Image (spheres, helix red, strand yellow):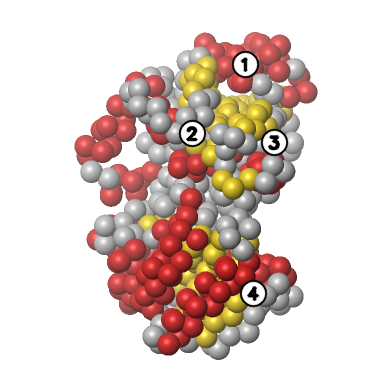
Amino acid sequence: MNHFLSLCEQVIGKENIILNETEGQAYVTDWRKRFKGKALAILRPGTTEQVAQLVKLCNTHMIAIVPQGGNTGLVLGSVPDQSGKQIVMSLTRLKQIRQIDPVNNTLTAEAGCLLAEAQYAAEQIQRLFPLSLASEGSCTIGGNLSTNAGGTAVLRYGNARELCLGLEVVTANGEIWNGLRGLRKDNTGYDLRDLYIGAEGTLGIITAAVLKLYPQPKSQVTALAAVASPDAALSLLTLAQENAGATLTAFELMSSVCVNLVRQHFPDIAIPALVPSPEYVLLEISDHESELHANTLLENLLNNAIEKNIVTDAIIATSIQQSKGIWHLREYISMAQAAEGKNIKHDVSLPISEIARFVASTNILLQEAFAGCRMVIFGHLGDGNLHYNVSPPKDMPDSSFILYQASINQIVHDNVHRFGGSISAEHGIGMLKKEELLRYKSPIEMQLMRSIKMALDPDNLMNPGKIL
């Protein structure tokens, strides 16, 4: 191993190799600090060419590679196992914005570029890069693409896959595929771009991407509405789509449990006062005409919803501060959950028409099996993605509750499958869900995935133990 590390040092310099266990803690520990792996070394290349050279060295010495961006994933996809035989390939030094093309509405960013930095670069030329996540100040473009990240604007703009036109990838054998073409139409065979997006680094290492930009909206107006049930929220969604069309950019569902947790653990957040309600919906309209037009559109929509008894109360933000308060309510849910104690997370997607039935039936099943457990349900209702999280009963210690994680997962995921959904909407599979994948994917799907893996990474050196 000393010879291997010496060769790596010749490529990237000694200062970009981390061997000290204390210095490497952040690279081997998952975001929720529930799993700690062990790495042979942390390698920090600064260019695509250096990535390719390191991959070739790993091939020669048969050393597995764990590609890593901001390490903000929730399914153990970006951390090494506990063998101490894998290297972590940190891409955070590849952080340049290589090109911005305002006419083609594209931005070419390296994989280690923070999502927030890509958003800011777009803003400087009066453009919008619409991918928006709570972790945007720490997650990277490479990680976003490797997990096909979703976020709050999928309803209008789509997942990370829909926001990417081209990729640069270092293949499993250390070759560089330059697919950085800013084309919206390119019908010349298999779409390699889509193959690498969402693959969690198991087929190759994304080093750069061409991203879609959009004109900056002239106004964004946010509202918070109280509804009686997920069914009522779906009725509001239908009405909003009929009235607002493509200007509807966010439609987020939050249960009263979520709202109360945020109020309890973050009392300084300015949360608008609404009548108590079982469910709340955050709506946002992005308009290219004017703020007056956007406000009028949203006011008419909510008045119509109140008249139809779909909404019981609503408030439209009249200032940037109020708008931030509404969004903070949504964004602080996960942190409030963490402050409350341990919880069992589920990132699921369902046909939108089945969401209300899924929630009602799953709530019943969980209460029958674990009386008193608390469902913390929120998510991107407009695209069918729910974060269906389960917290322990008030009188049960976290340590006891976590012992039931496998049973709770099976109840939730079996019901997701029954309603034609997916056990992973935007977080990925990683190590955490790979065994469950076998339960819900058909044998032919698994065989096709294994065939692709074998064709592109025959020695299984690219993020082994993840997905498959």
Q: Which residue is mark 1?
A: 49
Q: Which residue is mark 3?
A: 24
CB contact under 8 Å: marks 1 and 3: no
Determine the CA span between mark 1 and mark 3.
24 Å
Q: Residues within 10 Å of mark 2 (few under 14, many from 20)?
A: many
Q: Could you say whether the residue bearing mark 1 is in a helix, strand or loop?
A: helix
Q: Is 379 or 272 nearer to us in this picture?
A: 272
CB contact under 8 Å: marks 4 and 2: no
- What amino acid is at disc 2? Leu
CB contact under 8 Å: marks 4 and 3: no
Of tags 4 and 3, which is closer to the observer?
A: 4
The mark found on residue 165 in the picture is 2
Confirm whether residue 434 shows in the render.
Answer: yes
Q: Is 324 or 464 nearer to us in this picture?
A: 324
Residue 303 in the image, given as x and y percentages of width and height = 49, 83
Q: In the image, is residue 178 above or below residue 198? A: above
Of tags 4 and 1, which is closer to the observer?
A: 4
Q: Does 403 sit left or right of 123 as displayed?
A: left
Q: Is 71 or 114 nearer to us in this picture?
A: 114
| Residue at image coords 34%, 49% | 436
The mark found on residue 317 in the picture is 4
CB contact under 8 Å: marks 2 and 1: no
Q: Does 466 sit left or right of 350 as displayed?
A: right
| Sooner in the amino-acid sequence: mark 4 or mark 3 | 3
Q: Could you say whether the residue bearing mark 3 is in a helix, strand or loop?
A: loop
| Sooner in the amino-acid sequence: mark 2 or mark 1 | 1
